[in-house]
């Protein structure tokens, strides 16, 4: 596993239940587990999972490209897929096998159990037998395996992830907090705020800017918000216009 941030250390622990795992940290950060190795040693292993920030992918791919062996599988774990898959195809050697993955969960959501949580997979230059191996493995770990092209993934993620984080971060900046009269749905909104606040501003920015479909979804949301607000302004009840119509 390359990248020892919150997700990288979580992913190493997840995989260690079934595989021998080693890690590489470009920052020198040592989380205690997995045991750290040099970049050369990690790239010589059978499978390399990249758990670096999305924006750091091109530079890291350039570093590992000459180091990975002909039988090594390189897998990413990015929250967007179109650009990372393109980078892996362009930067890694033509014979390098590629597996694009997006575990739709992290250390926080996994605290409540893994069963049924989705993981998205897409093979590039990858034999069907190896893709099936990983599908079967994740299913054995009780995950729901979804196969999507990078474009299909990003179109969906622009709504399910980028928009969710945009709404959560906006509400957090508004100061949305627990309330003694909060409804169930209000408490769910507060929960979204707390979850997205745990992610770095870097991840939020990359999720928005490096998903080619996120900007259009944000614009659609803003347009519908303005249209709904305008509709509300046109539908003001008469009692609200009469200063004597409402009494505190």
Image (tube, grey):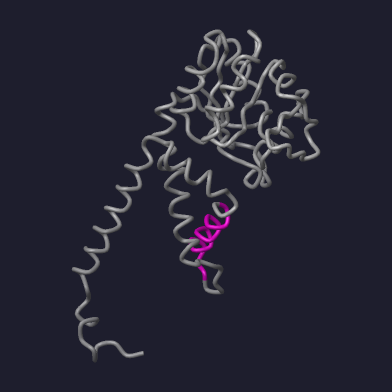
| Residue 79 screen position, x and y as percent | 51, 36
Query: Which residue corresponds to the image point at 20% horizontal and 86% vertical from the top-left?
Result: 242
Query: Residue 11's spot in the image, x, y percent?
Result: 68, 34
Number of dots carrying numbers = 0
> Which residue: 57% across, 13% down?
97
Q: Is residue 221 left or right of residue 59?
A: left
- Work out whether 127 lies above or below 87: above
**What residue span does the magenta drawing correspond to?**
182-195
Q: Quadrant of the N terminus?
A: top right
Residue 76 at x, y percent in the picture = 57, 27
Residue at horizontal 55%, vertical 11%?
93
Q: Is residue 100 left or right of residue 210?
A: right
Q: In the figure, is residue 135 to the left or right of 214? A: right
Q: Quadrant of residue 246?
A: bottom left
- Residue found at x 77% / y 26%: 37
Magenta span: helix, strand or loop, mainly?
A: helix
In the image, residue 73 above or below residue 28: above
Image position, residue 220 (x, y; %): 30, 47
Is 144 magenta? The answer is no
Q: Is residue 196 above or below residue 102?
A: below
> Measured along the vertical axis of the image, is residue 201 above or below residue 242?
above
Q: Nearer the viewer, residue 57 or 237?
A: 57
| Residue 190 among those drawn in magenta | yes
Q: Quadrant of the C terminus?
A: bottom left
Quadrant of the image occupied by residue 158: top left
């Amino acid at each position: 596993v390359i990248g020892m941030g919150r997700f990288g250390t979580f992913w190493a622990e997840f995989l260690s239940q079934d595989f021998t795992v080693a890690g590489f940290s470009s920052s020198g950060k040592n989380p205690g587990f997995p045991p750290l190795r040099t970049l050369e040693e990690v790239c010589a292993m059978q499978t390399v999972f990249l758990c670096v920030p999305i924006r750091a992918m091109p530079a890291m791919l350039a570093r590992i490209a000459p180091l990975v062996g002909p039988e090594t599988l390189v897998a990413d774990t990015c929250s967007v897929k179109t650009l990372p898959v393109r980078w892996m195809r362009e930067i890694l050697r033509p014979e390098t096998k590629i597996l694009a993955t997006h575990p739709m969960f992290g250390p926080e959501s996994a605290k409540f159990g893994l069963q049924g949580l989705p993981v998205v997979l897409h093979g590039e230059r990858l034999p069907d037998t190896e893709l099936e191996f990983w599908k079967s493995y994740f299913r054995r770990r009780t995950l729901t395996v979804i196969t999507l092209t990078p474009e299909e993934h990003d179109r969906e993620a622009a709504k399910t992830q980028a928009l969710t984080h945009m709404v959560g971060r906006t509400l957090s900046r508004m100061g949305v907090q627990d309330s003694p009269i909060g409804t169930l749905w209000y408490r769910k909104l507060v929960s979204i705020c707390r979850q997205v606040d745990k992610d770095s501003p870097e991840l939020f920015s990359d999720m928005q800017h490096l998903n080619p479909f996120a900007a259009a979804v944000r614009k659609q949301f803003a347009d519908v918000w303005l249209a709904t607000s305008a509709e509300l302004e046109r539908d003001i009840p008469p009692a609200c216009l009469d200063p004597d119509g409402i009494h505190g």
